[in-house]
Image (cartoon, helix red, strand yellow):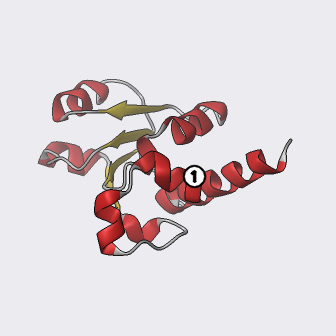
């Protein structure tokens, strides 16, 4: 394994730990950063054999409810009450990243650029 690959694994493990901190329930993660929705992170989840899905709308989340996903990743959306009772809802925001970004930078930086800095 090359050094760069180890660095990627480290940030991915950190983020997975921050969203799954001992939870036994299935989770819906509302990602305001976009980092959890990147190919680098979802490929990591796939390689860990985690049952997850990335949803782009509330309709996708509702459809995925009928499957046995342990993790549903999506952009911030309003979650219906019946899903809130069945899933742990996690709001993944900028303060959960291992690197701090000024609010002004957050408006300009893309998720791919954030991943390069992790």
Compare residues 51 and 47 and report the one nearer the observer.
47
Q: Is residue 117 above or below residue 95?
A: above
Residue under the image location 49 percent in, 65 percent down? 97
Q: Is residue 85 above or below residue 63?
A: below
Whether residue 2 is visible: yes
Q: Is residue 113 above or below residue 70?
A: below
The quadrant in which residue 95 appears is: bottom left
Q: Position of residue 82 (x, y in %)?
A: 16, 44
Number of residues whose C-alpha sits closer than 10 Å to that of mark 1, classed few (under 14), some (14–19) or many (20 or more): few
Q: Secondary structure at mark 1?
A: helix
Relative to 21, is 6 on the left or the right?
right
Compare residues 8 and 72 and report the one nearer the observer.
8
In the rendered image, which residue does mark 1 sit on? 116
Q: Position of residue 69 (x, y in %)?
A: 43, 32
Q: The C terminus appears in which quarter of the rendering?
A: bottom right
Compare residues 115 and 97 and report the one nearer the observer.
115
Q: Position of residue 100 (x, y in %)?
A: 47, 74
Whether residue 24 is visible: no
């Amino acid at each position: 394994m090359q050094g760069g690959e180890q660095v990627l694994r480290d940030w991915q493990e950190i983020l997975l730990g921050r969203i799954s901190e001992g939870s036994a329930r299935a989770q819906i993660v509302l990602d305001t950063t976009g980092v959890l929705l990147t190919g680098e992170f979802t490929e990591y989840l796939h390689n860990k054999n985690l049952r997850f899905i990335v949803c782009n709308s509330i309709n996708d989340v509702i459809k995925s409810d009928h499957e046995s996903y342990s993790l549903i990743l999506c952009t911030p959306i309003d979650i219906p009450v019946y899903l809130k009772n069945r899933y742990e809802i996690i709001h993944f925001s900028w303060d959960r990243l291992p690197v701090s970004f000024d609010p002004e930078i957050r408006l300009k930086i893309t998720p791919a650029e954030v991943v390069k800095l992790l």
